[in-house]
Image: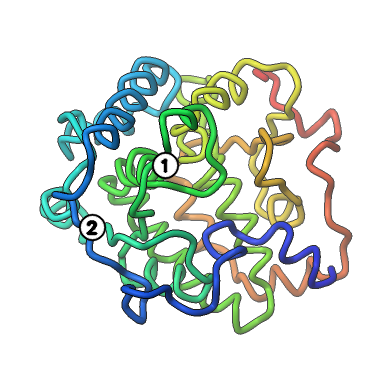
Amino acid sequence: MNEANHIKEAERHGAWASPVPPPGAAADWTVPQHWDELTDEDHWVWDTLFARQTTLLHGRAVHEFEESLEVLHLSRPGIPNLDELNEKLGARTGWKVVAVPGLVPDDVFYQHLSKRQFPAGNFIRKPSQLDYLEEPDVFHDVFGHVPLLAQPGVADFMHELGLLGLQALELGQLHRVARLYWYTVEFGLALERGEPRIYGAGILSSFGESHYSLESAKPHRLAFDLKRVLRTRYRSDAFQQSYFVIDRFEDALKLLRENDFAAVCSELDGLPDVDPWLADEAELLAAA
């Protein structure tokens, strides 16, 4: 795959980031949250999105997501104060959320994950952008990602994914980790009582894709296969064309621990990438 294609589909936290921290950011790209400077409109956007998504996701998201919203007290009005949130999250799984000004480079992103730190955009979309914002903001990052970080299995998976990302950078295989991240952390589905449920943050934080991922006849819903995932391209600017459904979302951690990433990548390097619109009949879930 050439460099242009790598950039096109690279994991979105770093693909479009400047290599230099902006003014006011530390070397690791973190910035103060300045929670007291948030406006009434900022909090209104959060509350509007929160109310809409929690209503929609009841019965659509894995049950641990709703459980974690209450554990972390995210149902309180307004954008969460990260200092207060981190007290609860740290006590549960040792993770914390750090504010960043926007997209960060890949090495910075995976360094944070390897230290059990999740970078969250220190801004929120405008009222006119309620339905879609391509760059991840605080609602996507905190509402979509953070609740499941209160679950030990997910917390450990994300930590090991950070370590894997750093390894992949050295191996020149970052696009493989980006695909794994994309089809699990961002757009993953998991079976619950025999039915697909949402655990990926890109779906959890999207009103339209919460419907589309489970109800539309357009996308493929495929049984999760690690090698297939690592070969499958994706787009960051549209609803997904394929969703990979794992038996239980907790099984993602087992995938990292039971596979030699470097060996798998070496095996896949001789195989072509897969278009996400293409799928064999045998790969499709019967329930889809």
Q: Residue 10, labelled with which disc?
A: none
| Quadrant where the image shows the C terminus | top right
Considering only vertical position in the picture, is 200 above or below 48? below
Frontmost of labels 1 and 2 is: 2
Q: Residue at x 45, y 36 (%)?
A: 199
Q: 20 and 110: which one is in front?
A: 20
* 262 left or right of 147 in image: right
Q: Secondary structure at mark 2?
A: loop
Q: Residue at x 57, y 44 (%)?
A: 134
Considering only vertical position in the picture, is 94 above or below 134? below
* x and y, in percent, of residue 261 in the image: 61, 70
Q: 115 and 255: which one is in front?
A: 115
Q: Which amino acid is tagged 1?
A: His
| Quadrant where the image shows the N terminus | bottom right
Q: Which residue is mark 2?
A: 33
Distance CA(mark 1)–CA(mark 2): 16 Å
Q: Residue at x 15, y 35 (%)?
A: 73
* x and y, in percent, of residue 266 in the image: 75, 74
Q: Residue at x 20, y 34 (%)?
A: 78
Considering only vertical position in the picture, is 48 above or below 25? above
Quarter assignment of residue 114 = bottom left
Is there a contact, CB below 8 Å, between mark 1 and mark 2?
no
Q: Which residue is mark 1?
A: 140
* x and y, in percent, of residue 77 in the image: 17, 29
* x and y, in percent, of residue 58 in the image: 37, 17
* 232 left or right of 75 in image: right
Q: 211 and 14: which one is in front?
A: 14
Q: Which amino acid is tagged 2?
A: Gln
Quarter assignment of residue 253 = bottom left
